[in-house]
Image (tube, rainbow, N blue to C red):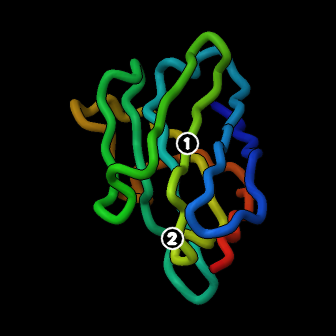
Amino acid sequence: QVQLVESGGGLVQAGGSLRLSCAASGRTFSSYAMGWFRQAPGKEREVVATISWSGGRTNYTDSVKGRFTISRDNAKKTVYLQMNDLKPEDTAAYYCAATPRLDWLPPMSTIEYNYWGQGTQVTVSS
């Protein structure tokens, strides 16, 4: 089992940057693929980016490609989301999640993820 705690959210102007962090507990962090998801008010939770257990393979939703970068440090049991050129439509609560699935590409569906953090709010002003 793994517990997840996100940090790094905040208020930023359009065009700005933020880096989210997700710290995990447990001894088997490197056995999990990880993902970042977001949920805006009145909308369903959607995938942002995912990363394989080794960090060697990543996957992004189209709207963030070229702007966001997911990475992980297994020694620190932490996954990151670097967000550049932020837009007002990126405003949402951001969640990290973990799955024990070891597919070639990390899963992009919320239902594949077993463990979730409490979320951190990102607000982008225009």
Relative to residue 17, is residue 26 depicted above or below? above
Q: Position of 30 compared to 106: left or right? A: right
Q: Quadrant of residue 46?
A: bottom left
- Considering the image in quadrants, where does the N terminus appear? top right
Secondary-structure class at tag 1: strand
Between residues 80 and 33, which one lies in front from this camera angle?
80
Between residues 95 and 20, which one lies in front from this camera angle?
20
Which residue occupies 76% across, 65% down?
11
Q: In the image, what residue type sits under mark 2?
A: Arg
The residues tagged by marks 2 and 1 sit, at their Cα atoms, a distance apart of: 19 Å
Q: Position of 5 compared to 94: left or right? A: right
Relative to residue 117, is residue 42 depicted above or below? below
Q: Position of residue 108 (x, y in %)?
A: 34, 53
Q: What residue did someone put label 1 on?
A: 82
User: 10 Å neighbourhood of mark 1: few (<14), some, or many (≥20)?
Assistant: some
Q: Find residue 45 and name its label.
A: 2
Q: Position of residue 99 (x, y in %)?
A: 46, 39
Q: Nearer the viewer, mark 2 or mark 1?
A: 1
Which residue occupies 76% across, 45% down?
7
Q: Quadrant of residue 74?
A: top right
Residue at the top extreme?
A: 75
User: 10 Å neighbourhood of mark 2: few (<14), some, or many (≥20)?
Assistant: some
Relative to residue 63, is residue 101 depicted above or below? above
